Image: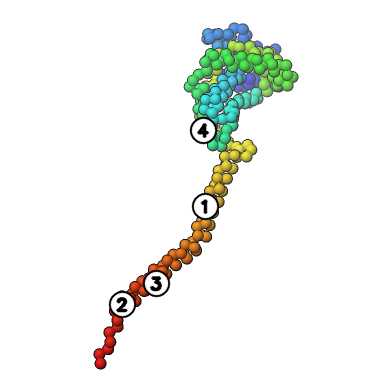
């Protein structure tokens, strides 16, 4: 809403909006198409931001899975999820990356680059159509679940969310149908993906296999080094004895040679 987009909560709550009969939703039958008039009708609907973000999130998850997992092979699983509380004028996103400790940094960097690519490489009509079909199929299937219907109906009677009515809930499928690639690009452009807006958190689930393997290799190297030093130390006394025996033989040889070659001592003159 701070970027000129509609929200379920107006900037200033009007007491008159508490009565559902005073709320008139735009006719989405005139919201189909790329024209300015149809786009204006879509943008005036309270579900515009939520549905456009849902389609954009589906596209982002498809790109993350294709790029980071299939193409680069850096992760077991990667996904992005948006949190849009109906009673708050702010939301947040969560990027989850699962990988090995040796690859987690590269996987996270690649995931962030892919996510930021949504601002550069805008969604195509083919991506929007695929995401729309996925969301509509999921919506139609989940409508058979009472828990899903209860979730959709949350805050319908809450005065703090005056624009959410039973009629609004019925427009979810129609809103998905009229959203196009320009709508997704406009709404996703409002998401702050800068380095300052992100907080990274690293956690380890289960045993760290790479760390255990590295520790085992270090222990093996230290054990081999200690064994070599022990063998060297045990060989030192034998080598010293052999050297001393050889040195003794050399000394005795020199002594004998000196005795033979020595001239007789001179006699004293009488």
Q: Which of 198 and 12 is in front in this view?
A: 198
Relative placement, left or right, of 236 versus 149 is: left
Q: Nearer the viewer, residue 262 or 239?
A: 262
Precedes in sequence: disc 3 or disc 2? 3
Which numbered dot is residue 50? none
In this rendering, position of residue 187 left or right of residue 156: left
**Residue position marked by numbered label 2 in the rendering:** 262
Q: Residue 225 carries which label?
A: 1
- 3D distance between C-alphas at marks 4 and 1: 35 Å
At horizontal 65% and vertical 23% (from top left) the residue drawn is: 86
Residue drawn at (47%, 62%) of the image: 239
> Foreground: 127 or 217?
217
Sequence-first disc among 4 and 2: 4
To which quarter of the image does residue 57 belong?
Answer: top right
Which of pointers 4 and 2 indicates the residue nearer the eye?
2
Q: What element carries label 4?
A: helix
Q: Is residue 1 visible?
A: no
| Label 1 or label 2, whichever comes before in sequence order | 1
- Label 1 vs 3, first from the N-terminus: 1
Which residue is labeled 3 in the image? 252
Q: Give the quadrant of residue 30.
A: top right
Alpha carbon separation for disc pair 4 and 2: 84 Å
Q: Which residue is drawn at 52% across and 60% down?
A: 234
Find the residue positioned furthest to the bottom: 270
Residue where numbered disc 4 is placed: 106
Q: What element carries label 2?
A: loop
Q: What element carries label 3?
A: helix
Q: Do the residues labelled 3 and 2 touch (CB within 8 Å)?
A: no
């Amino acid at each position: 809403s701070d970027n000129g987009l509609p929200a379920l909560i107006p900037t200033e709550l009007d007491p008159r909006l508490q009565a559902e009969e005073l709320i008139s939703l735009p006719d989405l039958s005139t919201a189909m198409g790329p024209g300015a008039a149809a786009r204006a009708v879509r943008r005036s609907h309270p579900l515009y931001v939520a549905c456009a973000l849902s389609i954009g999130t589906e596209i982002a998850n498809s790109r993350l899975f294709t790029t980071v997992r299939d193409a680069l092979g850096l992760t077991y699983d990667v996904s992005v999820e948006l949190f849009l509380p109906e009673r708050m004028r702010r939301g947040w996103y969560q990027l989850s990356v699962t990988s090995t400790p040796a690859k987690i940094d590269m996987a996270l960097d690649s995931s962030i680059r892919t996510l930021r690519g949504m601002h550069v490489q805008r969604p195509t009509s083919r991506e929007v159509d695929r995401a729309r079909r996925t969301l509509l199929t999921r919506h139609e299937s989940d409508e058979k679940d009472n828990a899903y219907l209860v979730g959709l109906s949350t805050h319908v009677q809450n005065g703090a969310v005056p624009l959410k009515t039973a009629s609004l809930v019925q427009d979810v499928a129609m809103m998905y149908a009229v959203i196009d690639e320009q709508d997704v690009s406009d709404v996703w452009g409002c998401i702050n993906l800068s380095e300052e807006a992100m907080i990274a958190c690293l956690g380890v689930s289960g045993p760290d296999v790479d760390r255990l393997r590295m520790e085992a290799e270090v222990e093996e190297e230290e054990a081999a080094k200690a064994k070599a030093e022990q063998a060297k130390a045990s060989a030192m006394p034998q080598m010293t004895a052999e050297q001393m025996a050889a040195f003794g033989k050399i000394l005795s040889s020199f002594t004998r040679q000196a005795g033979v070659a020595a001239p007789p001592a001179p006699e004293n003159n009488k």
